[in-house]
Structure formats: structure tokens, C-alpha cells
Image: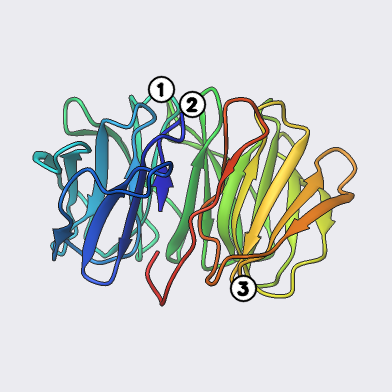
Amino acid sequence: MDASADGRVLAAVGGDSARLWDPITGLSPAPPLVGSGPPNCVALSPDGGTLALPGWDYAIELRDAATLRPLATLRGHDALITALAFAPDGRALASGSRDGEIILWDPSTEVPRATQLGGDRSVVALAFAPDGLVLASGSSDGAIRLWDVDSGRLRVAFGGHVAMCLAFGADGRTLASAGFDRLVRQWDISTGRLRSALRGHGSPVMSVSYSPDGQTLASGDDRGAIRLWEAASGRPRVEFRGHEGGVVSLRFGADGRSRRCPRRRGAGR
């Protein structure tokens, strides 16, 4: 599941279909896209105009987010696509696959900007830094890797847990990761040093997000709990409960106070 930068459009895949939603009205602006590809991941461009989906043939489908009309097909992977992320300016798209490969694309030209990034195991999470110059990847080998977007080179690798979700702080110097071990970790990206490990969730953590000012970190788990943390100290602030399923996506509003928290039903994301 993913959301536009302004939080006005949500994209979700699950079962055998992909859908767009208006989070305010709860209505879908277009009919569902059925059988388009495996329900592994989805990415929505920051302006809410372009939807990226994995295809059954290891390709990436780019579609108009308003109508779901096909725009382009990106080919280059040789295995199932497991993670997608747009850069903050929408000019780059990152895709990761089960064989560990990460490809950086220019969506406007349909040409890879950099290939052969990645580790030895399946890529499970991707996130761009706010300036779009660094890409973070989480893999099933337990490593978090930071990549230089312009050169495609590895900057640093660190970790020790499988990061199912990643999020950069507003200043681009801190990265949050979380996963099945129920911990939320904050890392210094310049050194790879662990800043804090936040304990409190009782089930796997599926989503993390920083507030626009970087002072608050939100995390959502597989049982529907959402926790807010003071980012600098790691102290817990408040916990929300009410979702019936897992919280697979979190997004703060532009004012830093509202949050959009889509939930998961069944096994879809």
C-alpha cells in the first residue's frame, strides 16, 4: 500500500486486484484492476498521478492513477518484484526483486538508470531519502544497505534484522526500520550506527513514518496497534488501537498532526 505525498490518494493491492481510494470519502475513483500481477507491492508517485505495479512477467506496469490506463512497461528484472518506491520528486523509481537485484529507473524514458544493485537475498523494503540522493534497501539476509542514487554504488551496509519497512527522517540523516522482531530501530545513516531500539509492540511491525518536522516517529503493527515515539529520545508518547487488521502503511499529513493509517485484511498488502 502507498499514498501520494499529500495523502489524498491511496493505492492498495490485495487478492487478485489493485485499487485506488480516496481516504477522506472511502470511495474508489476507478474500477479495480483485476489480475494485473502478484499482490506483492505497489508505489504511487508523489503527485498521485502514476501508479507502479509488478507484473506476472517480472515487468513493472506504470498506469495513470486516475483511470488505471497503461502508460508504460519497464522490463529488466529476472525474478518476482517484491518492492517498489518512487523518489520524492517522482523522477526516479526503484524496484527490488526476489533474487536481490535493485534497479533504478527513469519513469519518463523507461530506461534503467542503474542496475545490479542489491544483495544476495530477496529485497523486502525500499525507501528514498528526502533529497532523493540516497536509497535504502532492506533484504531477507538481515542487512540494510544505503545506495548512492546518482552512481548506483553502495555507501554502507548495516543491520542485523529483516527490515520489512523503512522510513527516513525529515533531515535525511536518520533511518527507521522495523520488522518481525517487533522492534523499531533508528540508525545514523552516515555511520550505520544504531541510535535506538524502541520496544513496545507485541507483534511484527509493518509500517513506520516520521512526522514532517522529524520529531515524531509512528509505527504500526500486524495486530492493528499504532505507537507514536519521540524520535530524539525514543520515548513512547501514545498508543492507538482500533484497526481490525494490520497497519501496513502510515503517512503524516502536511501539518504533522493528522495520520492516514490504512489497514490490512487477510494477507494482502
Residue carrying label 2: 132
* Mark in front: 1 vs 3: 3
The answer to whether mark 2 and mark 1 are in CB contact below 8 A is yes
Mark earlier in primary sequence (2, 3): 2
Q: Which amino acid lies under the numbered mark 2 shown in the image of this protein? A: Gly
Q: Nearer the viewer, residue 22 or 138?
A: 22
Q: In the visual, does 233 lie left or right of 203?
A: right
Residue 102 appears in the figure: no
Circle 3 sits in a helix, a strand or a loop, which is it?
Answer: loop
Q: Which amino acid lies under the numbered mark 1 shown in the image of this protein? A: Asp
Q: Which mark is residue 223?
A: 3
Where is residue 190? Give x, y as percent. Answer: 72, 34
Question: Residue at 51% across / 59% down in the picture?
Answer: 248
Circle 1 sits in a helix, a strand or a loop, which is it?
Answer: loop
Residue carrying label 1: 89
Where is residue 131? Give x, y as percent. Answer: 54, 22
* Mark in front: 2 vs 1: 1
Mark 1 nearby-residue class (10 Å; few <14, some 14–19, many ≥20)? few
